[in-house]
Image (cartoon, grey):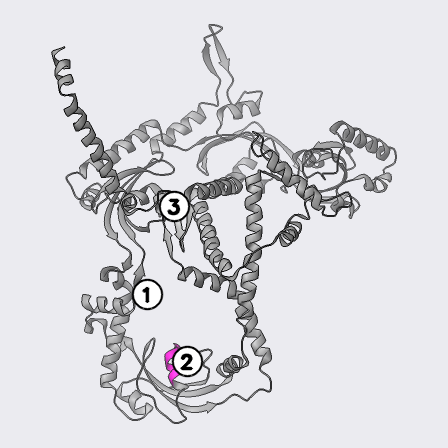
Amino acid sequence: MAVLNKIRQRSLFLILIIALALFSFVLSDLFRNSSALSGASQDVVATVNGTDIFREDFMNQVENAQRAQGPGASSTQTMNRIYEQEVRKAVLSSQFEELGLSVEKDQMRELLKTSFSSYPEFNNEAGIFDENKLNEFIANLKAIQNNEQNRAPLGNFQLNYNEWVTNEASIANRAKEQTYFNMVRAGVVTTLAEAETEYLMENETVDLKFVNIPYTSIADSLVEVTKSDISKYINEHKSEYEVEASRDIVYVQFDEVATVEDENEIKNSLTNLLEDRVEFNKVSKLNETILGFKNTKDVAEFVNSNSDVKYNDKFLFKSALPASIADSIFKLEVGEFYGPYKENGYYSLSKLVAETQMADSVKVRHILIPYMGATRVDPTITTTDAQAKAKADSILSVIKSKQSKFVDLLDLSSDTVSNEKQGEIEFGYNDSFAPEFKAFSFDNKVGDIDVVKTSFGYHVIEILDQKNKSKAVKVATVSRTIEPSEKTIDEVFNTASKFEIALQDGDFQEIAKENNYQVKPVSFKVLDENIPGLGSQRAIVRWAFEGETKVGDYKRFTVPGGGYAVVQVVKKNEAGLMSPENASATAISKIRNEKKAKMIKDKISGSTIDEIAKANKVATLTATAVTMKSPTISGAGREPKVVGVAFGMKEGEISKPIDGVKGVYVVEVTKATPASKLDNYQPIANRLSATRGSSVLTKAYNALKEASDIEDNRANFY
C-alpha cells in the first residue's frame, strides 16, 4: 500500500515521463522517415507535373492487374507496370488539356461499339450490335454496385460498375492518345531538302589513302592516369556518368539442402516400402499386415498414399520416359522393380505394372453434340446434358445400322473445323486432347464406334485407323522429394546464427574466409526486386536503403527455397555523378587513349602519307567507295570522325592527325565521286517519313516524359 501511495503522490511526474517517452518515440520515427519531415504525403505514390498519383487508387489497380495476370507475375513487376501506365496517363493528360482534346458522348458511343461489337451480350437476334443492350448492361451494373454480388458476367470474365467506368476511361484515353500522336506524326514529314541530303550521304563516295597509328603501339604502362584525371573526365562527360542511388552489399548464403545422410534416409524409406509390414491397430487392438509395394493389389492407391507425385495410369512409349531410365524400365518384366534412382529432384522407385502394343497415332471421325454449360459452348445452345446424351445415342443407333450415314449426319455436329474434313481428326498419343476422347481412340480397335462424354459434350466416335503400333508400358512410381531433414535445417540455422554472432566483433570478409564461406558482392538500385543468387528480395533492398542502415551494418534474411543470407552493406552510392572508383572501369581506357593520341601526334613527322607511315613503322592503307551514311573504312572499322573529316577535304589534300576510335589517322582523299542529281526526291522523302512515323509514338512520349517533373515515391510503399 505504501508503494501505491507513493505512485499516486507522484502521478503527475510519471505522466510527464511517459509523455516524454512517447514523444521521443514519435520523433525518432520521424527522423527515420524523412518524408514525414519533408512534407511528402504518405498517400502519394508519385507526382507528375503537379498531378498526384494516390496510393489507394494505385494499389486497387495493382490488385486488379495481379488478379488478371495470376501468380505468374510478381507484385513488384505488376506495380512497376501500373506505375508506368499512370505516369504515361499523367504526362499525356497535361498535353491533352493544353490542346483541348476530349472525347464527346457520340464519339464515346462509337468507341464502345467498336470495342464490344463482338460480344454476344450486346448483339440482337440478327447478330448486330444493339446500343440498347449496352445501355441496359451498364444500368444493371450501376444498380447492383452496392450489392454483395456486384459483379456481372461479360465474355469470359466478370466485372463491377467501377471496373466498367475505369475501362471506359481507358478507351477514351486511348482515343485521345491516337489523335494526339496522329497530329505529331503529321508534323514529322521529311522535306525534299532532307531527302536530298540523305541521298547524297548514301551515294557520294571518297577513295582514301591513309595511315593508322594504333593506340596499342604505346604500352599502357607508359601512360599514367590519376584520380584527378578521372574526376576531370567525369565532369566533362556528365551525361555518361550520371547514376541513380545504389547500394553495394556482400552476402554469405546458407542453403537448406539435403545432405548425403538425408538422401540415404530417403532412399532407405523407399526400399522399406517394398516389403509387407506388421502394424498394431489401436482401434481393433490387433496386429495388421500392411501390404508393401511388391504385393499390393491396388497400385494406384499405394502410390497416391506414399508418393509425392500422383499415380499416372497411362501407357507410355519409351520416348516419353526420362532418357536416363528408359532403357532400364523397358528391360523389366511385369511386376519387377527399378530403383531407387535419382531424377529431377526426387528419389524414385518404379514398378512395371503392365505392357501392351499401342499405336502412336490414330485417325477417327466424330460428331459432337454439345450441351448448355459445356467447355467453349456457343451461348445460343440451350440443350441440357440429358437431351444431348439422348441425341448422341440416337445418332449412334442410326450409324450402327448403316455406317455410310455418318457423313450425312455431320450437319448435327457443332465441330465446324472437323466437319470440313468429313468429321475426321488425326492426332498423336502425346497430343493434347480430352482424356476420355483420347482413351477411347487408343484403347479400342479400328472399326469400334461409341458415344463418349467429354467436357465439350457428347461425341459419337468411330476409329478409322491406328498407326505404328509399338511397345508401351504402364509404370507405377513412388517418388520422394529430395529435401533436407529437420536436423539439417536446424544445423543450417545454427551455422548462420554463429556467423552472424561472430560479426559483432569481427570482420565480415575475414570470418567468411576462416570458415571457407563464399562471399558474393552485389549492387542494386532502390526499386530493384531480384538479387543475383537470392531471387526476389525486396526486404534486403528496402533494408539497405533505410536511413538508419549504415555502411558496415549486417542482417540475416531468409531466402526463397529455404535457408538464409547474412548481408552486409559495404557502400552507399548516392544519386549523381559516379565516383572516380566506380567510373574507372570505363573512363581509364578512354583517358589513356586521349593521352596516347597526344603522344602520337607529337611524334608524327613527314609531309606525305608514305613518309608518315615509314616514320611510324606502319603500313600505308587504302579504302574505296567510303560513304557518309556508313562511315566504315576497310581495314580500320567504323571511324565516323575520320570519315567526316575526309568528306570536308578536296582531292589530293592531306589531313591533320585525327583522333579516331582505334588510333590516330592521317588521311588523303585520292578521289571524290559526287552523286548524280535526281529529278525527283519525293520517293526518298516518303520512305524517310514512313520510318520516322513508325517510331514517333515512342520517341515523342519519351521526350515528354524526360521533360516532365516526376517525383517517384514508389520505394516508400514496396
Q: Is residue 626 above or below residue 157?
A: below
In the image: residue 153, left or right of residue 328: right
Quadrant of the rendering where the C terminus is positioned: top left
Q: Is residue 589 above or below residue 31?
A: below
Check disc 3 and report its element: helix, strand or loop. Answer: strand
Disc 1 to disc 2, how far (Cα)?
A: 27 Å
> Is residue 340 at least partly visible in the picture?
no
Write down the residue under mark 1: 240
Of 31 and 194, nearer the camera is 31
Write down the residue under mark 2: 633
Which quadrant holds residue 687?
bottom right
What's the amino acid at mark 1?
Answer: Glu
Write down the residue under mark 3: 44
Q: Which residues are magenta?
A: 633-645
Looking at marks 1 and 2 on the same chain, the residue that comes earlier in the sequence is marked by 1
Q: Is residue 677 magenta?
A: no
Rendered location of residue 353, percent (x, y): 58, 28
Check disc 1 and report its element: helix, strand or loop. Answer: helix
Looking at marks 3 and 1 on the same chain, the residue that comes earlier in the sequence is marked by 3
At x 44% / y 63%, what residue is drawn? 703
Rendered location of residue 457, percent (x, y): 72, 34
How many residues crowd around disc 3 within 10 Å: few (fewer than 14), some, or many (20 or more)?
many
What's the amino acid at mark 3?
Answer: Val
Check disc 2 and report its element: helix, strand or loop. Answer: strand
How many residues crowd around disc 1 within 10 Å: few (fewer than 14), some, or many (20 or more)?
few
Of 489 and 586, nearer the camera is 586
